[in-house]
Image: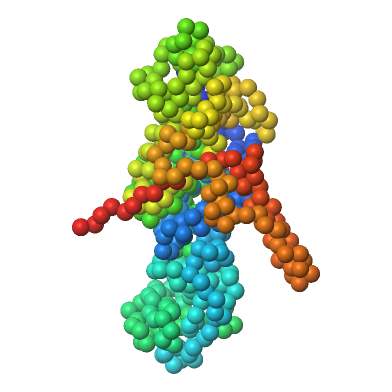
Amino acid sequence: MDALPWRDAWHDALYAAGRGFYVTRGGPAEHFTTATHGVTGAALAEALLRLWLREHDGLPAVVVDVGAGRGELATHLLRALDDVSPVEGSLPDTPDPVEWAVSPTDDGWKVPTRPGGDDDEWAVSPTGDGWKVPTRRGGEDGDGWGVPTRPGEDVEWAVSPTDDGWKVPTRLGGEDGDGWGVPTRPGEDIEGAVSPTRVVAVDVVERPAGLDERIGWMRSPGGAALPDELAGLSDALVIAHEWLDVVPCTVAQVDTGGTTRTVLVDPRTGEETLGPEPSDADRHWAAAHWPATTPGDRIEVGLSRDEAWADLVARVDSGLLVAVDYGHTRAERPSGGTLTAYRRGVQGDPVPDGTMDLTAHVAVDSLDADEVGRQRDLLRRLGVRGQTPPHALASSDPLAYLRALERAGAEAELIRPAGFGDFWWAVKRVAGRDVT
Ligand SMILES: C[S@@+](CC[C@H](N)C(=O)[O-])C[C@H]1O[C@@H](n2cnc3c(N)ncnc32)[C@H](O)[C@@H]1O
């Protein structure tokens, strides 16, 4: 078989219809563990939402996970959205216990007059203004809020009848003090609410069986290519966790004469030879971001990743994008390159024959981003500390203690140096287009 540029052989090996590794060999989780799996995934999802909430009033309209595997992170994000009120520090202070007032319609129903109460009974107002409303975790109501009102009714917001400035849901068309939607009364089984945020997962396979039906699924061509229908995203939080490292790139090497040449590979054996010089665009990228002149030095040309990322950014009209990946910056480019393979948890020599994952670290500082930093630093800023709970909790509430202990362990994993903490985050903010 003819040797091919790594970029082409790599793309076929991972994404070719009917034989690519990611198309035919089960989900990534069958071959390696990532931070999106299990308890670390739950902590990561909450931190990503917290990042959004620190910069926006209210929840995003849509959360998109690109390179979603089998929906692991999307599932955690959905749960975090349902549980949004426990995201500490991300919402206005809500110290008061819930109080109830009789509905102004005087029908015996009561309305909540202040946020508070149990964390899992509260969510952010669908008006995106940071107010909280009572909900029930796991409720269902199509794509919108399960709204704490009578089933089938839309909700508007009005100032609380106790005149304390808080808002409560009302019937559509209701005015302050008129036509309240009577959300509930204490002890009443509250009509379930779900987050108003759509969650969409994007990957190269059909929708996985068993995925929560509230998660939308989009099938993608794979590699640098994204689905056409992923476009015009507004008020969107877009996450690409370990996507860019599997976007195939040109691999080049400096030959004995000092000329940079494209590395070709035999797809059956992985045997490499040196081919022609890279394209002008690849050479320009290398000159700008990864200059190498020592014979034998390798360059993983990040242009295809930059372009794939820019394509994703261009699909967002307003919002926040976060790429999370293995990476390096100019100060520490690995002279031998990072291209490697994984199969069933075992790292090995890369052979682009469709039987293994092929991955190379991302030149994160060439991505179009407003902020690039180590995961451990960004997560710490978001309050992820991995602090163990006070020991007294073990006797006062043993179950809560165990849960907090597990969460602390997950957080510590996410920020651990020489572990997930070394990942890079590239954050890009897209302001809404001006409406005139
Ligand atoms: C290394 S795995 C990471 C999976 C998951 N994000 C995680 O961190 O556990 C990379 C995933 O990206 C997917 N992928 C690659 N190119 C893609 C594309 N253009 N659109 C959507 N998914 C893509 C692969 O199929 C694979 O599931």
Determine which quarter of the picture holds residue 402: bottom right
Q: Position of residue 157 (x, y in %)?
A: 38, 76
Residue 193 appearing in the image: no
Q: Where is residue 120 in the image (x, y as percent from the top left)?
A: 58, 69
- For the residue pair 314 and 217, the one nearer the viewer reads as 314
Q: Which residue is drawn at 35% across and 19% down?
A: 280
Residue 366 appearing in the image: yes
**Colour convention of the picture:** rainbow
Kindly give the residue lying farthest to the left in the view shown: 436
Q: Which residue is drawn at 49% across and 22% down?
A: 299
Horizontal side of residue 194 vs 33, given as left or right: left
Q: Residue at x 55, y 36 (%)?
A: 326
Specify the quadrant that holds the C terminus: bottom left
| Figure check: 378 above or below 248 | below
Horizontal side of residue 412 vs 436, given as left or right: right
Q: Which residue is drawn at 66% across and 47% down?
A: 413
Q: Position of residue 407 (x, y in %)?
A: 67, 56
Kindly give the residue lying farthest to the top in the view shown: 257
Horizontal side of residue 384 vs 113, given as left or right: right
